[in-house]
Amino acid sequence: MKNVTLYIDLTFCFILLPLVIYAFPVERWWGTYPVFFCSFVAWLYVTYFLYKNLIIPGVFLKGKKRVAALAMVLLSLSVTFIFSSYEITSPLYQAHQQQRVVSPYPIWGIRQNQQAIWLHYILVVVFCFAVGMLKEVYRQKLARAEVEYERNRAELALYKAQINPHFLFNTLNTLYGLLITRSDKTEVTMERFINLTKYIYKNANREFIPLAEEVDYIGEYIELQQLRLNELADVSFTHDVEHDEMPIPPMMLITFVENAFKYGISSNDPCFIHIKLSQRAGTLRFEVRNSTFGREVSSSRRMGIKNCRRRLELLYPGRHRLSIEQEHDSVFHILLELKMEEEA
C-alpha cells in the first residue's frame, strides 16, 4: 500500500497536475506574473498534500480531529479565495474595460483567470477525495480482515488455553472431595462449573457480549477457585457497573484474573488477590492487584498478555490504556481502562 501511495503522489505531481496547468490559461501567467504563477502552483501542491494527509483522514474520525479537518477546509478555501481575488489582466481585460462603458453587465469569460484558479483547486480536491476514499475503503477492509483473523485465533485459543488442564483438574479434585464428604456445597459447585464451561463455548464465536455476563463469569470463577484456598488467602472482587449492557469482548478480563490466581496464590504463605471493576459513562476501569512469590513468569503468561494487548489495539485503537507493573517485590498490579466512544 505504501508503494501504491507513492506512485499516486508521483503521478499526480509530475504528470496530472502539470497537464492540467498546461491545458488551462494558468501557464500564460508565467511570462507576465512569474511570482504569482509559482505561488499558485505551490499552493496547489500544498492543497493536495494537505487534503491527502490531514483533511481526508480527519473527516473519517470523530470529535476534535474532525473539527480540525473542517477548519483546515475553511482555511484552504480562504487562501484560494485570496488567490482568485488578485486582479490579473487577461486577453479579455481591455474588452472588459470597454464593455463597462457600454453595458453595466460583464460579458462571459471576463473572469476567466479567476475561474481557472477555482477550477484547478476543485480538480485537486476531487482527486484527493477520490484517492482518499479508495484508501479508506482499503484500510477498513484490511482492518476487518485483521480483526477477523485475530478473532478466529482467539476462538481457537479459548479451547486450548482457557479450559486448561490445571483449572479442570483442580476443579474436578475439589468436586471429588465434596462428593466423598457428602458436602452440601457439591450441587452448587457442580452448577458453577457447568455454567463456566457453557459460558466459554457459548461466547467463543461472539465478538462482544454484555458487560454483566463477563462480570457474572468472573464472580463464578472466583467463587469456584476459592473452594481450594485456605485461610491464608485474601480474595476480593468489587464491581460497580452503571450500564449492564455495555458491550465488551468476551474472555478479555478473565485473562488477568486467571494469571492472578495462577501466580498470586500460595498454600503456605499469606497472599491476596484484589479485583476492582467500575464502569461509568462509557468508560470501564478494571484493576487487579495480587501478591507474588518470585516465581518465574512462564512464556504462556507472556503470550496471554501479548494477545490481550493485540486484541485491545484492534478493537479499541486509541481508546484504551493497559498498565502492567511490578509495584515492588511482592505485589503485581494491572490496570485496564477502556473507552467505548471517543469524547466529542
Image: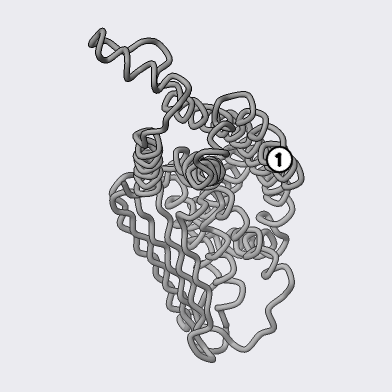
Quadrant containing the N terminus is top right
* Above or below, 31 relative to 179: above
Identify the amino acid type marked 1: Phe
From the viewer's side, name the closer residue of 19 and 224: 19
- Residue at 67 percent across and 48 percent down: it is 154
Within 10 Å of disc 1 (Cα), the crowding (few <14, some 14-19, many 20+) is few
Residue underneath mark 1: 14
The structure's colour scheme is one colour
Rendered location of residue 263, percent (x, y): 60, 77
Give percent across and percent down for residue 7. Answer: 75, 41
Q: Please determine whether, in this image, residue 213 is positioned above or below residue 298.
A: above
- Left/right placement of residue 282 relative to residue 178 reads left
Residue drawn at (23%, 11%) of the image: 104
Observer-nearest residue: 290 or 89?
Answer: 89
In the image, is 333 to the left or to the right of 285?
right
Give the residue drawn at x 48%, y 58%: 185
Residue 159 lies left or right of residue 86; in this view the side is right
Question: Toward which corner of the image does residue 205 lie, by quadrant?
Answer: top right
In the image, residue 30 sits, relative to residue 101, either above or below, namely: below
Look at 27% across and 10% down and name the residue there: 105
Residue most extreme to the bottom: 329
- Drawn side of residue 104 relative to residue 330, left or right: left
